[in-house]
Image: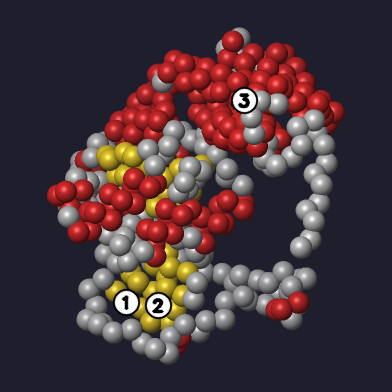
Amino acid sequence: MPKLKWDSINVLVVDDNAFIRNLIISTLRVLGLTNITDMGSAREAVDRLKLSRKDPAGAGIGSIDIIFSDFVMAQVDGLLFLRWVRTSKDAPDRFTPFVMVSGAADQEAVEAARDAGLTEFLAKPFSAKSLSDRVLEVIKNPRQFVLAPGYFGPDRRRQERPTLWSAGDEASGGGGKDRRTTKASEIQVIHAFSNVRTLRDDVRAIYFRPANRLRDKLGPNALRGQIDFDPLVIQAAETKVQELVGDYSVWVQRYVEQITAAYRALSRKDGASHKHLLTINAVAHELRGQGGIFDYPLITSFGKTLCEATSDSGVEITENRLRLLEAHIDAIRLVFTKQVRGSGGDVGAALLKDIETAVKKYSEPRKPKARS
Protein backbone atom coordinates (compact mmCIF):
# COMPACT_ATOMS: atom_id res chain seq x y z
CA MET A 1 0.00 0.00 0.00
CA PRO A 2 1.24 3.54 -0.73
CA LYS A 3 2.84 5.36 2.21
CA LEU A 4 0.58 8.15 3.45
CA LYS A 5 1.39 10.97 5.87
CA TRP A 6 -1.30 10.23 8.44
CA ASP A 7 0.67 12.09 11.11
CA SER A 8 0.21 15.35 9.17
CA ILE A 9 -3.52 15.41 9.98
CA ASN A 10 -4.33 17.41 13.12
CA VAL A 11 -7.18 15.87 15.14
CA LEU A 12 -9.12 17.35 18.05
CA VAL A 13 -10.85 14.92 20.46
CA VAL A 14 -13.40 16.39 22.89
CA ASP A 15 -15.07 14.20 25.52
CA ASP A 16 -15.73 14.74 29.22
CA ASN A 17 -15.21 11.03 29.84
CA ALA A 18 -11.44 10.55 30.20
CA PHE A 19 -11.59 6.83 29.54
CA ILE A 20 -13.46 7.10 26.22
CA ARG A 21 -11.34 10.10 25.25
CA ASN A 22 -8.17 8.08 25.78
CA LEU A 23 -9.68 5.12 23.94
CA ILE A 24 -10.32 7.24 20.84
CA ILE A 25 -6.83 8.73 21.07
CA SER A 26 -5.16 5.32 21.46
CA THR A 27 -7.06 3.92 18.48
CA LEU A 28 -6.24 6.91 16.26
CA ARG A 29 -2.56 6.68 17.17
CA VAL A 30 -2.36 3.02 16.21
CA LEU A 31 -3.95 3.97 12.88
CA GLY A 32 -1.14 6.49 12.38
CA LEU A 33 -2.95 9.72 13.30
CA THR A 34 -0.54 10.81 16.02
CA ASN A 35 -1.03 14.58 15.84
CA ILE A 36 -3.87 14.78 18.39
CA THR A 37 -5.12 17.42 20.82
CA ASP A 38 -7.64 16.35 23.46
CA MET A 39 -9.88 18.33 25.79
CA GLY A 40 -12.27 17.37 28.55
CA SER A 41 -15.02 19.85 27.71
CA ALA A 42 -16.56 21.62 24.75
CA ARG A 43 -16.27 24.88 26.70
CA GLU A 44 -12.49 24.47 26.76
CA ALA A 45 -12.49 23.52 23.07
CA VAL A 46 -14.47 26.63 22.11
CA ASP A 47 -12.09 28.87 24.08
CA ARG A 48 -8.98 27.33 22.53
CA LEU A 49 -10.37 27.35 18.99
CA LYS A 50 -11.45 30.96 19.42
CA LEU A 51 -7.93 31.83 20.57
CA SER A 52 -6.37 29.91 17.68
CA ARG A 53 -8.11 32.23 15.24
CA LYS A 54 -6.36 35.27 16.76
CA ASP A 55 -3.18 33.71 18.15
CA PRO A 56 -2.38 30.23 16.72
CA ALA A 57 0.91 29.99 18.61
CA GLY A 58 -0.68 31.00 21.90
CA ALA A 59 -3.52 28.49 21.48
CA GLY A 60 -1.00 25.72 20.86
CA ILE A 61 -3.32 23.59 18.74
CA GLY A 62 -2.55 24.63 15.18
CA SER A 63 -5.07 24.20 12.38
CA ILE A 64 -7.57 21.46 13.26
CA ASP A 65 -8.41 19.07 10.38
CA ILE A 66 -10.96 16.74 12.03
CA ILE A 67 -12.99 17.06 15.24
CA PHE A 68 -14.25 14.07 17.21
CA SER A 69 -16.74 15.16 19.88
CA ASP A 70 -18.99 13.41 22.35
CA PHE A 71 -22.70 14.24 22.09
CA VAL A 72 -23.71 14.38 25.77
CA MET A 73 -21.48 16.66 27.88
CA ALA A 74 -22.09 19.00 30.81
CA GLN A 75 -22.54 22.75 30.27
CA VAL A 76 -21.84 22.79 26.52
CA ASP A 77 -22.92 19.58 24.79
CA GLY A 78 -21.76 18.26 21.44
CA LEU A 79 -24.71 19.74 19.57
CA LEU A 80 -24.04 23.27 20.82
CA PHE A 81 -20.33 22.81 20.12
CA LEU A 82 -21.12 21.74 16.55
CA ARG A 83 -23.43 24.73 16.03
CA TRP A 84 -20.66 27.03 17.25
CA VAL A 85 -18.14 25.51 14.82
CA ARG A 86 -20.54 25.92 11.91
CA THR A 87 -22.02 29.36 12.64
CA SER A 88 -19.81 31.44 14.93
CA LYS A 89 -17.75 34.28 13.48
CA ASP A 90 -15.10 33.30 16.04
CA ALA A 91 -14.74 29.73 14.71
CA PRO A 92 -11.39 29.36 12.91
CA ASP A 93 -12.79 27.12 10.14
CA ARG A 94 -16.51 26.49 9.64
CA PHE A 95 -15.74 23.78 7.08
CA THR A 96 -13.89 21.51 9.56
CA PRO A 97 -15.13 17.89 9.35
CA PHE A 98 -17.01 17.11 12.57
CA VAL A 99 -17.58 13.52 13.78
CA MET A 100 -20.12 13.15 16.60
CA VAL A 101 -19.54 10.21 18.94
CA SER A 102 -22.46 9.02 21.07
CA GLY A 103 -24.25 6.10 22.63
CA ALA A 104 -27.52 7.92 21.90
CA ALA A 105 -27.60 6.83 18.26
CA ASP A 106 -31.38 6.89 17.86
CA GLN A 107 -32.93 8.60 14.85
CA GLU A 108 -33.82 11.76 16.76
CA ALA A 109 -30.24 12.30 17.96
CA VAL A 110 -28.73 11.59 14.54
CA GLU A 111 -31.16 13.94 12.79
CA ALA A 112 -30.53 16.73 15.32
CA ALA A 113 -26.79 16.43 14.74
CA ARG A 114 -27.26 16.26 10.97
CA ASP A 115 -29.36 19.43 10.98
CA ALA A 116 -26.70 21.23 13.03
CA GLY A 117 -24.05 20.56 10.37
CA LEU A 118 -22.69 17.09 11.21
CA THR A 119 -20.17 15.43 8.88
CA GLU A 120 -20.28 11.87 10.26
CA PHE A 121 -21.88 10.09 13.23
CA LEU A 122 -19.96 7.40 15.14
CA ALA A 123 -22.23 5.34 17.39
CA LYS A 124 -20.99 3.83 20.63
CA PRO A 125 -20.05 1.11 21.09
CA PHE A 126 -17.55 1.57 18.26
CA SER A 127 -14.70 -0.52 16.95
CA ALA A 128 -11.35 0.45 15.45
CA LYS A 129 -12.82 -0.46 12.06
CA SER A 130 -15.88 1.79 12.44
CA LEU A 131 -13.70 4.67 13.65
CA SER A 132 -11.26 4.24 10.75
CA ASP A 133 -14.20 4.10 8.33
CA ARG A 134 -15.33 7.56 9.49
CA VAL A 135 -11.85 8.97 8.95
CA LEU A 136 -11.68 7.49 5.45
CA GLU A 137 -15.17 8.74 4.57
CA VAL A 138 -14.24 12.30 5.54
CA ILE A 139 -11.12 12.18 3.35
CA LYS A 140 -12.26 10.10 0.38
CA ASN A 141 -15.80 11.41 -0.04
CA PRO A 142 -15.90 15.04 1.10
CA ARG A 143 -19.33 16.61 0.64
CA GLN A 144 -20.02 20.08 -0.62
CA PHE A 145 -21.21 22.61 1.96
CA VAL A 146 -24.65 24.16 1.69
CA LEU A 147 -25.74 27.61 2.84
CA ALA A 148 -29.54 27.84 2.88
CA PRO A 149 -32.19 29.43 5.13
CA GLY A 150 -31.68 27.92 8.60
CA TYR A 151 -28.74 25.71 7.66
CA PHE A 152 -25.01 25.72 7.00
CA GLY A 153 -23.02 22.51 6.81
CA PRO A 154 -22.22 19.47 4.68
CA ASP A 155 -24.85 18.61 2.09
CA ARG A 156 -27.44 16.49 3.90
CA ARG A 157 -28.33 14.75 0.65
CA ARG A 158 -25.97 11.84 0.13
CA GLN A 159 -27.92 10.62 -2.92
CA GLU A 160 -29.52 12.41 -5.84
CA ARG A 161 -33.05 11.14 -5.44
CA PRO A 162 -36.36 12.82 -4.61
CA THR A 163 -37.22 13.40 -0.97
CA LEU A 164 -40.94 12.82 -0.76
CA TRP A 165 -43.51 14.28 1.62
CA SER A 166 -45.38 11.68 3.63
CA ALA A 167 -48.91 10.84 2.49
CA GLY A 168 -50.43 12.44 5.60
CA ASP A 169 -48.65 15.78 5.30
CA GLU A 170 -51.38 18.31 4.54
CA ALA A 171 -48.98 21.16 3.77
CA SER A 172 -47.61 19.27 0.77
CA GLY A 173 -51.02 18.65 -0.71
CA GLY A 174 -50.59 14.92 -0.32
CA GLY A 175 -47.83 12.34 -0.54
CA GLY A 176 -45.61 11.53 -3.49
CA LYS A 177 -44.32 15.06 -4.12
CA ASP A 178 -40.65 15.99 -4.00
CA ARG A 179 -39.89 18.17 -0.97
CA ARG A 180 -36.98 19.78 -2.85
CA THR A 181 -38.30 22.90 -4.45
CA THR A 182 -35.06 24.79 -5.13
CA LYS A 183 -34.26 24.99 -8.83
CA ALA A 184 -30.77 24.88 -10.32
CA SER A 185 -31.07 28.53 -11.35
CA GLU A 186 -31.63 29.46 -7.69
CA ILE A 187 -28.33 27.90 -6.57
CA GLN A 188 -24.93 29.57 -6.75
CA VAL A 189 -21.90 27.26 -6.79
CA ILE A 190 -18.59 28.47 -5.37
CA HIS A 191 -15.58 26.32 -6.28
CA ALA A 192 -12.29 26.27 -4.38
CA PHE A 193 -10.36 28.11 -7.06
CA SER A 194 -13.13 30.12 -8.70
CA ASN A 195 -12.78 33.84 -9.27
CA VAL A 196 -16.18 34.61 -7.72
CA ARG A 197 -15.90 37.36 -5.11
CA THR A 198 -19.56 38.21 -4.49
CA LEU A 199 -22.69 36.24 -3.67
CA ARG A 200 -25.86 36.75 -5.68
CA ASP A 201 -28.91 38.19 -3.93
CA ASP A 202 -31.43 36.17 -5.93
CA VAL A 203 -30.35 32.67 -4.87
CA ARG A 204 -32.04 30.38 -2.33
CA ALA A 205 -28.95 28.25 -1.68
CA ILE A 206 -25.18 28.46 -2.12
CA TYR A 207 -22.97 25.41 -2.66
CA PHE A 208 -19.36 25.66 -1.50
CA ARG A 209 -16.97 23.09 -2.94
CA PRO A 210 -13.66 23.56 -1.10
CA ALA A 211 -10.41 21.82 -2.01
CA ASN A 212 -9.73 18.43 -0.42
CA ARG A 213 -7.19 19.67 2.09
CA LEU A 214 -7.04 16.40 4.02
CA ARG A 215 -6.17 14.35 0.94
CA ASP A 216 -3.46 16.86 0.02
CA LYS A 217 -1.99 16.61 3.52
CA LEU A 218 -1.53 12.85 3.08
CA GLY A 219 1.07 13.56 0.40
CA PRO A 220 1.49 12.81 -3.32
CA ASN A 221 0.74 9.11 -2.86
CA ALA A 222 -2.84 10.03 -1.91
CA LEU A 223 -3.32 11.40 -5.42
CA ARG A 224 -1.90 8.34 -7.20
CA GLY A 225 -3.17 5.43 -5.14
CA GLN A 226 -6.01 4.15 -2.99
CA ILE A 227 -6.47 5.93 0.34
CA ASP A 228 -6.93 3.23 2.95
CA PHE A 229 -5.56 1.81 6.18
CA ASP A 230 -3.49 -1.35 6.07
CA PRO A 231 -5.66 -4.28 7.32
CA LEU A 232 -2.83 -5.21 9.70
CA VAL A 233 -3.02 -1.73 11.22
CA ILE A 234 -6.77 -2.13 11.74
CA GLN A 235 -6.11 -5.47 13.44
CA ALA A 236 -3.48 -3.86 15.67
CA ALA A 237 -5.93 -1.13 16.62
CA GLU A 238 -8.59 -3.71 17.52
CA THR A 239 -6.01 -5.48 19.70
CA LYS A 240 -5.22 -2.19 21.41
CA VAL A 241 -8.90 -1.74 22.25
CA GLN A 242 -9.03 -5.19 23.82
CA GLU A 243 -5.87 -4.49 25.85
CA LEU A 244 -7.78 -1.74 27.62
CA VAL A 245 -10.36 -4.16 29.05
CA GLY A 246 -8.54 -4.25 32.38
CA ASP A 247 -8.61 -0.47 32.60
CA TYR A 248 -12.30 -0.51 31.78
CA SER A 249 -13.05 -2.86 34.66
CA VAL A 250 -11.44 -0.41 37.05
CA TRP A 251 -13.29 2.51 35.49
CA VAL A 252 -16.64 0.73 35.65
CA GLN A 253 -16.17 0.06 39.36
CA ARG A 254 -16.26 3.83 39.85
CA TYR A 255 -19.48 3.96 37.85
CA VAL A 256 -21.06 1.25 39.98
CA GLU A 257 -20.05 3.12 43.13
CA GLN A 258 -21.56 6.34 41.75
CA ILE A 259 -24.96 4.89 40.91
CA THR A 260 -25.03 2.84 44.12
CA ALA A 261 -24.40 5.97 46.19
CA ALA A 262 -27.09 7.88 44.27
CA TYR A 263 -29.55 5.01 44.72
CA ARG A 264 -28.92 4.86 48.48
CA ALA A 265 -29.41 8.62 48.75
CA LEU A 266 -32.75 8.25 46.96
CA SER A 267 -33.75 5.45 49.33
CA ARG A 268 -32.94 7.60 52.36
CA LYS A 269 -34.58 10.67 50.77
CA ASP A 270 -31.26 12.39 51.32
CA GLY A 271 -31.03 15.61 49.32
CA ALA A 272 -32.69 16.60 46.05
CA SER A 273 -33.94 13.49 44.27
CA HIS A 274 -33.59 14.99 40.79
CA LYS A 275 -29.84 15.39 41.25
CA HIS A 276 -29.44 11.72 42.17
CA LEU A 277 -31.54 10.66 39.17
CA LEU A 278 -29.44 12.86 36.88
CA THR A 279 -26.30 11.17 38.24
CA ILE A 280 -27.69 7.70 37.54
CA ASN A 281 -28.91 8.76 34.09
CA ALA A 282 -25.50 10.20 33.13
CA VAL A 283 -23.74 6.98 34.17
CA ALA A 284 -26.34 4.84 32.39
CA HIS A 285 -25.78 6.83 29.20
CA GLU A 286 -22.04 6.17 29.39
CA LEU A 287 -22.52 2.47 30.11
CA ARG A 288 -24.81 1.86 27.15
CA GLY A 289 -22.21 3.39 24.85
CA GLN A 290 -19.19 1.58 26.28
CA GLY A 291 -20.17 -1.99 27.13
CA GLY A 292 -20.15 -3.38 23.61
CA ILE A 293 -16.69 -2.02 22.87
CA PHE A 294 -15.23 -4.39 25.43
CA ASP A 295 -17.46 -7.38 24.73
CA TYR A 296 -20.00 -6.55 27.45
CA PRO A 297 -23.21 -6.22 25.39
CA LEU A 298 -25.29 -6.94 28.49
CA ILE A 299 -23.98 -3.69 29.98
CA THR A 300 -25.11 -1.87 26.85
CA SER A 301 -28.60 -3.39 27.24
CA PHE A 302 -28.86 -2.64 30.96
CA GLY A 303 -27.48 0.86 30.45
CA LYS A 304 -30.12 1.56 27.83
CA THR A 305 -33.09 0.54 29.99
CA LEU A 306 -31.62 2.26 33.06
CA CYS A 307 -31.19 5.41 30.98
CA GLU A 308 -34.85 5.22 29.97
CA ALA A 309 -35.94 4.60 33.56
CA THR A 310 -34.18 7.77 34.74
CA SER A 311 -34.85 10.04 31.74
CA ASP A 312 -37.31 12.16 33.73
CA SER A 313 -35.54 13.56 36.78
CA GLY A 314 -38.71 15.19 38.07
CA VAL A 315 -40.68 12.00 38.79
CA GLU A 316 -41.83 10.97 42.24
CA ILE A 317 -39.51 8.44 43.88
CA THR A 318 -41.86 5.56 44.64
CA GLU A 319 -41.07 2.12 45.97
CA ASN A 320 -41.51 0.68 42.49
CA ARG A 321 -39.00 3.10 41.00
CA LEU A 322 -36.47 2.22 43.68
CA ARG A 323 -36.93 -1.50 42.98
CA LEU A 324 -36.41 -0.90 39.26
CA LEU A 325 -33.18 0.99 39.90
CA GLU A 326 -32.00 -1.65 42.34
CA ALA A 327 -32.58 -4.44 39.82
CA HIS A 328 -30.45 -2.64 37.23
CA ILE A 329 -27.62 -1.84 39.64
CA ASP A 330 -27.50 -5.43 40.91
CA ALA A 331 -27.42 -6.78 37.34
CA ILE A 332 -24.64 -4.41 36.29
CA ARG A 333 -22.56 -5.27 39.36
CA LEU A 334 -23.04 -9.00 38.76
CA VAL A 335 -21.93 -8.78 35.11
CA PHE A 336 -18.57 -7.37 36.15
CA THR A 337 -18.16 -9.46 39.28
CA LYS A 338 -18.70 -12.66 37.26
CA GLN A 339 -16.99 -11.30 34.09
CA VAL A 340 -20.08 -12.12 32.01
CA ARG A 341 -18.93 -11.24 28.49
CA GLY A 342 -20.70 -11.74 25.20
CA SER A 343 -24.23 -13.05 25.48
CA GLY A 344 -23.30 -14.64 28.80
CA GLY A 345 -24.94 -17.99 28.06
CA ASP A 346 -27.49 -19.11 30.63
CA VAL A 347 -26.36 -16.48 33.15
CA GLY A 348 -26.75 -13.69 30.60
CA ALA A 349 -30.16 -14.95 29.51
CA ALA A 350 -31.32 -15.07 33.13
CA LEU A 351 -30.09 -11.53 33.80
CA LEU A 352 -31.82 -10.19 30.71
CA LYS A 353 -35.04 -11.91 31.74
CA ASP A 354 -34.76 -10.49 35.26
CA ILE A 355 -34.40 -6.94 33.90
CA GLU A 356 -37.27 -7.41 31.43
CA THR A 357 -39.45 -8.66 34.29
CA ALA A 358 -38.43 -5.74 36.51
CA VAL A 359 -39.19 -3.21 33.76
CA LYS A 360 -42.66 -4.67 33.21
CA LYS A 361 -43.40 -5.01 36.92
CA TYR A 362 -42.02 -1.76 38.31
CA SER A 363 -42.23 0.76 35.47
CA GLU A 364 -44.89 3.39 36.08
CA PRO A 365 -46.75 5.28 33.35
CA ARG A 366 -45.66 8.86 32.84
CA LYS A 367 -48.16 11.49 33.78
CA PRO A 368 -49.08 13.83 30.92
CA LYS A 369 -47.71 17.34 31.32
CA ALA A 370 -50.28 19.96 32.19
CA ARG A 371 -51.02 22.41 29.41
CA SER A 372 -50.29 26.02 30.09
Sort mark 1 into few (<14), some (14-19) or many (20+) by Cα contacts within 10 Å. some
Residue ID for mark 2:
206
Residue ID for mark 3:
262
Q: Secondary structure at mark 1?
A: strand
Residue ID for mark 1:
190
The kind of residue tagged 3 is Ala
- Residue 12 figure quarter: top left
Sort mark 3 into few (<14), some (14-19) or many (20+) by Cα contacts within 10 Å. many
Taking 206 as reference, is 124 left or right?
Answer: right
Q: Position of residue 185 (x, y in %)?
A: 44, 87
Mark yes or no: residue 221 visible: no
Q: Position of residue 267 (x, y in %)?
A: 72, 22
| CA separation in Å, label 2 and label 3 | 51 Å
| Residue drawn 70% across the image and 79% down it | 172
Work out which residue is located at the far top of the displayed protein and give it.
338
| Residue drawn 61% across the image and 9% down it | 338
Which is more N-terminal, label 3 or label 2?
Answer: 2
Mark in front: 3 vs 1: 3
Q: Position of residue 115 (x, y in %)?
A: 52, 62
> Would you say the residues marked 1 and 2 are in contact, meaning their CB atoms lie under 8 Å apart?
yes
Sort mark 2 into few (<14), some (14-19) or many (20+) by Cα contacts within 10 Å. some
Give the numbered dot on residue 8: none
> Would you say the residues marked 2 and 3 are in contact, meaning their CB atoms lie under 8 Å apart?
no
Mark yes or no: residue 188 visible: yes
The kind of residue tagged 2 is Ile
Image quarter where the N terminus lies is: top left
Q: Secondary structure at mark 2?
A: strand
